[in-house]
Amino acid sequence: MAASPVVGSFVAGDYAVFALMLLVSAAIGVYYAIVGRGQSSSREFLMGGQSMTAVPVALSLTASFMSAITVLATPAEVYQYGASYGLFSLSYVLVVVVSSEVFLPVFYRLGITSTYEYLEIRFNRATRLLGTVMFIVQTILYTGIVIYAPALALNQVTGMDLWGAVISTGVVCTFYCTMGGLKAVVWTDVFQVGIMVAGFLSVIIRAVVLQGGVSNILNHAEFGGRLNFWDFDASPLRRHTFWTITFGGTFVWTSIYGINQAQVQRYISCKSMTHAKMSLYINLLGLWVIMLCSVFAGLCLYSVYKHCDPWTAGMVSAPDQLMPYMVLDILRDYPGVPGLFVAAAFSGTLSTVSSSVNALAAVTIEDLIKPYTHMSEKHLSWSSKGLSFLYGALCIGMAGIASLMGGLLQAAISIFGIIGGPLLGLFSLGILCPYANATGGLAGLLSGLVMSLWVGIGAQFYPPLPEQSRPLGLTTHGCNFTTAADAFNWTASPTEPSLYTTVLQQNTAERPFLADTWYSLSYLYFSPIGTLTTLAVGLVVSLLSGGMKLKLEPRVTLMKEDTMLFCFYKHFKERAMRRAGKLDLTKNREKKFGNNNPGLGNVHELDFTKSSLP
């Protein structure tokens, strides 16, 4: 199928579906505002009263960071670079295991509202404040991308008003966060993850029908080199290989699921440790479903436009616009269905922004207000709502900066790598190393941040050369259409190079030595660099500053009783001992040579050693 120069546009039915999604999200906030009138404390508002069960929390965990970036940018990534991005499904397994076995037990046992409270309990207040500030900066930057990205892409393709979309989604999100607290955020996430999956399926099913079946789409992908899962090149300079995704991706996503306030706040809101751990493992299934949908949507995108790349042909101005372009192209005869896909993209936005706003309010209350004031719980509860409103407005304002950040997917993951990596190293240092002290923790965090900022900023000034990212070939030789503007038949030259491969070539003589080594590292390694630097420096400084003399409460570090492996061992050991006890017939047998005779008081019958008789 060739790209059409004029695709469908939004109609009343599409706007109705999109408006309905916003209305239902707002209604959930109103419902929990009415039901939760008794949320008199900030903890109830921010933590849901620790009464949540595993399934809704699991779906909320899935939705929180599966944003519009997933809906729009992941299919474009697969279209451009191939399906190797799907290997993140393997890293998700490692992430969930590490988060549930290492970080969750400690946070849940301490009963904290903000993860950064842990840093003061384990290290000192200065470390807590630095961690809090880093989290706030990271979250506001990321949220700006999440709000702006879908609005820009959809504005360019559908004609939807850019700032109208930004402000409407931001206002609705801020409204239900402020009104309903964490419970409203979790239940809107459940609704929105359903919308995301429905939006993906509507596009996938239509593309499969048009292309003649799933097997045809897979055949086109294989012929085009898109099924490139098993690239075991060990070079750290390659953008995406098996190793960069499984190793680097594990660090990036552990910094999100293990220590990020938005995620930790959710599983700590569960009513028991068992529900908290279950929520993480059920969430793994949700992550796999979303990943499968987004990767297969990318393969559908390639199958539909394999002979006529809309970006090279000038139909769209950025790869993030490819999915909405295809939606309007192949679903133009189904009013309302393009609106469902747009609702899916904005559902991703709402779920992520609401998580971020709620988390920002929580850390501000717990880390920046409570320790320095003596406010009543009622005032703290009102402050939580006011902060939710303030951060919602701030995130809408920060959306403008997102336009300066280049590719959405890489920009989003780079932010988490640069700031989340050192924070992951600091929390790992505290939980896993009993002799790490405050001096080592602070020195490690600053060192890790300097290293990750150095490589991250350097990569922005000296982007890797095309041979490291290796975009796959795209063509326009099948484009044969009449333009709407001048009504002449225009056919692209078969030899016209794709915009994906005509990356700006810099004169290698002008590039410093570090540009093709250190700055060309895969962006997925930014997080491991920050984490490992923080751990190494933190351990060395702690040992040199008397860390071996440190006396800690056991509850602030990982204990063997926290791990599921130990629970299984204990369970099987008890079963084995019970079984052995049943087989040992002499185990409970006691030697009794005489019994009490009721007629003789305490005189033992036949037991003369205990008798009072001489």
Image: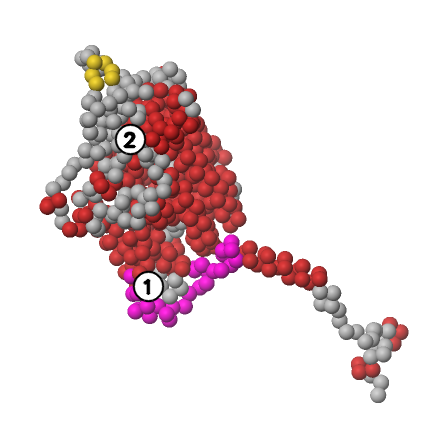
Residue beneath the point at 31% across and 56% down: 532
Check disc 1 and give the amino acid type. Answer: Leu
Question: In this view of the protein, which residue sits in the foreground, 7 or 146?
Answer: 7
Residue 182 in the image: above or below residue 5: below
Which label sits on residue 539? 1
Where residue 236 sits: x, y (%)? 27, 49
Q: Main secondary structure of the magenta part?
A: helix
Name the amino acid, label 2: Asp
Q: Residues within 10 Å of mark 1 (few under 14, many from 20)?
A: many
Q: Residue furthest left?
A: 509
Count how many numbered circles sit on residues in the image.
2
Q: Taking 379 as reference, is 481 left or right?
A: left
Q: Position of residue 577 (x, y in %)?
A: 64, 61
User: In terms of depth relative to the viewer, which is nearer, 233 or 311?
Assistant: 233
Residue 429 in view, yes or no: yes
**What label does residue 320 carry, if any?**
2
- Rendered residue at 27%/45% (across/down): 238
Which residue occupies the foreground of this view, 352 or 80?
80
Farthest residue, direction bottom = 614
* In this view, the mark in front (1 or 2): 2
Region rendered in magenta: 537-566
Residue 391 is left or right of residue 484, and the answer is right
Q: Position of residue 149 (x, y in %)?
A: 29, 32
Q: Which residue is depicted at the point 75% across and 71% down? A: 590
Q: Position of residue 606 (x, y in %)?
A: 85, 79
Q: CA distance from mark 1 to mark 2?
A: 43 Å
Q: Quadrant of the C terminus?
A: bottom right
User: Is 435 located above or below residue 315 in the figure?
Assistant: below
